[in-house]
């Protein structure tokens, strides 16, 4: 019996497992790491306009408005804050996109596309809104220093106005903005205080998604002020001009969207917890916000007896940050409207109108706050309602410019952009109209 010879198939070497791919192709992993590093560096280079404008919205006027909303109406008007934050994202993205694509600020574009009269109208509305907001920031400094050290406004307001002006005029604002951001970040304490106050989370959820309309004039005024303090006119002009000043290009647009959405969401989240903390503490005890010490009580679940000090520090830090930024919005807009240089890197002799507008807006606001007997809390609150009224003179220009395909090319507003922006303008107009009707009747 003979055997048939067979040949055995040689074993093939096993394929290395997937984790070894990095070893076999180290250049690929290195390229991926370099790509991530480049993207991170590009994002860090772009970050600024959105985050700065967003966090500056949580200024003394914003904190005061959100405190009044929570203290007077509990959780029921949280939907207004949610809608305002969505509107903030929509229009901040629009302003940044327009600035990056065109390389021009809002007032310069209005003048070029619609003429000098339109530019004068828009500039007048913005200047009035900005001076009102600067008044609120300096009132915040006065209120914060009264809480912290009992310092008179006749000392704290002039010192703050001069100090902030020197920081900006000497060109060192970008070196200290991080310090001011850190000080204003004290208001993140509201997040912890909101949890520690054991709020009604079910009522919070309902307030965010179920719209309820108060029937009183005061309730509508709170809604209008919330819209005005979140979607502030100064922020729209500032973010567009600052994006131009930073010389951002179209390639940076994606990173800038991350920057501005992050800033807007931080505004909304901090505002949410201000309302929740005040609803769980002040509203539950029937306390209304008549001065800064009343608003400070919402931090007691976190800070106890140190709540007043913590609130005062945050108020002053946020006020100084916003007092530096808001006049920049005015300065950019005035210089652009008259086609003059508008750059923080310029010296005073190169851009006298830019720096002159900055100083004038700060000086007028300081003079108003120093009027004997001027009430600080009403200045902080009512200035934000004025913002909402004046938004109606600015938002249509921003929307119209962004729709212009000859100007924006493929970055012009799409269908959903047009719907979203129209809804925001309609909401602001309806709120202001309701306030006017209730005020007249």
Image: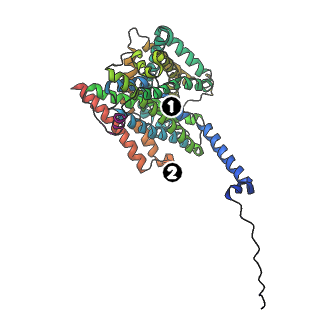
Vertical order, 418 against 241 (above or below) = below
Between 263 and 235, the residue placed more toward the observer is 263
Answer with left or right where residue 361 lies relative to residue 47: left
Vertical order, 366 against 343 (above or below) = above
Between 308 and 432, the residue placed more toward the observer is 308
Answer with left or right where residue 282 lies relative to residue 265: left
Answer with left or right where residue 383 lies relative to residue 189: left
Q: Where is mark 2, residue-wise?
A: 410
Q: Which residues are magenta?
A: 201-215
Number of marks present in the image shown:
2
Which colour style is shown? rainbow
Is residue 175 located in the magenta-colored stretch of the structure?
no
Note whether residue 341 is visible: no
Between 89 and 95, the residue placed more toward the observer is 89
List x then y, in percent, for residue 285. 33, 20
- Residue 53 bears which disc, if any? 1
Is residue 213 located in the magenta-colored stretch of the structure?
yes
List x then y, in percent, for residue 212. 29, 35
Q: Secondary structure at mark 2?
A: helix
- The span from disc 2 to disc 1 (Cα, nearest Å) is 26 Å
List x then y, in percent, for residue 422. 37, 43
């Amino acid at each position: 019996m003979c055997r048939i010879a067979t040949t055995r198939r040689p074993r093939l070497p096993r394929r290395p497992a997937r984790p070894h791919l990095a070893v076999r192709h180290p250049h690929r992993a290195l390229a991926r790491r370099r790509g991530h590093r480049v993207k991170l560096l590009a994002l860090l280079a772009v970050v600024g306009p959105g985050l700065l404008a967003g966090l500056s919205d949580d200024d003394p006027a914003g904190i005061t408005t959100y405190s009044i909303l929570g203290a007077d109406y509990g959780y029921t008007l949280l939907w207004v804050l949610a809608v305002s934050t969505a509107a903030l994202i929509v229009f901040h993205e629009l302003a940044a996109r327009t600035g990056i694509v065109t390389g021009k600020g809002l007032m310069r574009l209005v003048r070029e596309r619609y003429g000098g009269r339109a530019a004068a109208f828009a500039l007048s509305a913005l200047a009035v809104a900005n001076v009102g907001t600067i008044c609120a920031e300096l009132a915040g400094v006065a209120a914060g220093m009264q809480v912290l050290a009992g310092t008179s406004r006749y000392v704290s307001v002039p010192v703050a106005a001069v100090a902030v002006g020197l920081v900006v005029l000497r060109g060192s604002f970008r070196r200290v903005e991080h310090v001011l951001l850190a000080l204003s970040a004290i208001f993140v304490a509201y997040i912890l205080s909101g949890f520690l106050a054991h709020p009604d989370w079910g009522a919070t959820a309902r307030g965010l998604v179920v719209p309820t309309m108060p029937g009183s004039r005061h309730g509508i005024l709170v809604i209008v002020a919330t819209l005005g303090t979140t979607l502030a006119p100064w922020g729209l002009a500032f973010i567009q001009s600052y994006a131009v000043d930073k010389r951002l290009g179209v390639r940076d647009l994606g990173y800038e969207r991350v920057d501005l959405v992050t800033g807007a969401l931080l505004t909304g989240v901090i505002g949410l917890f201000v309302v929740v903390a005040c609803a769980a503490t002040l509203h539950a005890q029937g306390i209304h916000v008549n001065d800064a010490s009343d608003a400070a009580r919402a931090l007691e679940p976190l800070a106890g007896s140190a709540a007043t000090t913590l609130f005062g520090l945050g108020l002053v830090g946020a006020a100084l940050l916003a007092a530096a930024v808001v006049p920049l919005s005015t300065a950019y807009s005035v210089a652009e409207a008259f086609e003059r240089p508008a750059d923080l890197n310029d010296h005073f002799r190169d851009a006298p109108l830019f720096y002159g507008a900055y100083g004038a807006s700060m000086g007028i606001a300081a003079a108003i706050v120093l009027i004997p007997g001027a009430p600080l809390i009403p200045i902080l609150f009512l200035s934000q309602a004025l913002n909402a009224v004046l938004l109606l003179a600015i938002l249509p220009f921003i929307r119209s410019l962004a729709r212009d395909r000859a100007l924006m090319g493929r970055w012009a507003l799409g269908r959903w952009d047009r719907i979203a922006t129209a809804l925001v303008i309609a909401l602001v107009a309806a709120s202001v109209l309701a306030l006017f009707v209730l005020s007249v009747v």
